[in-house]
Image (cartoon, rainbow, N blue to C red):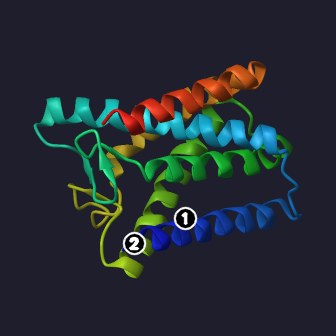
Amino acid sequence: MDGMSLILFALSWLVIIYVGNCMLAGKVIVPNWSEMSLYITTMAALGLIGEIIFDSVYQAVFNAPLWVYHVLPIHDSYTSIYSVFLWGMIGLHIYLLKDLLKRKKLTSALAFSTIFMVEAIVIETLVNLSFLWLFDDYIYYYLPADLWHLASLQTLPLYLFAGFITYITLRTARRYSRLALMGNFLVIAILVLWR
C-alpha cells in the first residue's frame, strides 16, 4: 500500500463518519471549523499518548503487547503515525455527535464514557476490517484473538477510562481552546517526530 492509498482510505472514513453522524442527527451538520479542529487534535494527541502508555504498561505486566501497529509504526509499534488520523477521526465523530448527545440528555461523564467505550471498539473494528479487506493487512494487530485480531474485548476497560479522560480533557480544552489547540499540535509533533 502506498501513501495515496492510505490518504484515500482515511478520506473515505472521514466521509463515512460525517454522513453517519448527519444521518443520526437527521440533518446536515455544518461544522464550526475552530471547534471541530480542537476536538480532532485533542483526540489525536490523547490517542497517541494513551496508546503508548497503556500498551507499555500492558507489555510490562503481561510480557507481550496487546496490539502491534503494522502501518507506519512508531514507539515500538505501540502507536503509529497513522494513529493521528485514526484518533482524529474519533475526535471528529465526538464533535459531530455532541449535539445529539445533548438533545438525548446523555451529557454525564458516565454516559459519555460508556458511549465512547462501545463506539471506539466498534469503529476500530470496522476500520481495521475494511483495511484488511482492501489491503490484506491490519492497521493494528491485536494479539488476543477474541475479536479475530481486529480489536479486543480487553480494551473495554481502557476505553471506559479513556472516555472519562476525554470527557474531562475536552471540557477543559473548550475553555482554553487556543492554548489547547497549540498544545495538541505540539504533543502530536513531538510524538510523531521523536520515535
Seen in the picture, residue 34 relative to 181 is either above or below; the reply is: below
Does 68 sit left or right of 157 as displayed? left
Element type at marker 2?
A: loop
Does 161 sit left or right of 91 as displayed? left
Does 166 sit left or right of 155 as displayed? right
- 110, 98: nearer the viewer: 98
Residue 10's disc number: 1
Q: Residue at x 65, y 69 (%)?
A: 16
- Quarter containing the N terminus: bottom left
Q: How many numbered badges does the structure rendering display?
A: 2
Question: Do callouts 1 and 2 mark residues in contact (Cβ within 8 Å)?
Answer: no
- 160, 191: nearer the viewer: 191
- Mark earlier in primary sequence (1, 2): 2
Seen in the picture, residue 140 relative to 113 is either above or below; the reply is: below
Instruction: Identify the image quadrant of residue 183.
Output: top right
- 105, 55: nearer the viewer: 55
Element type at marker 1?
A: helix
Q: Residue at x 46, y 58 (%)?
A: 124
Q: Residue at x 39, y 72 (%)?
A: 2
- Quarter containing the C terminus: top left
Question: Badge 2 is on which residue?
Answer: 2
Asked whether residue 113 is in view, the answer is: no
x, y percent for residue 187 = 50, 28
**Gap in angstroms between the C-alphas marked 1 and 2:** 13 Å
Does 149 sit left or right of 63 as displayed? right
Look at discs 1 and 2 and give the one toward the viewer.
2
x, y percent for residue 115 = 60, 45
Seen in the picture, residue 44 relative to 180 is either above or below; the reply is: below
Q: Residue at x 26, y 46 (%)?
A: 77
Asked whether residue 137 is in view, the answer is: yes
> Disc 2 residue type?
Asp
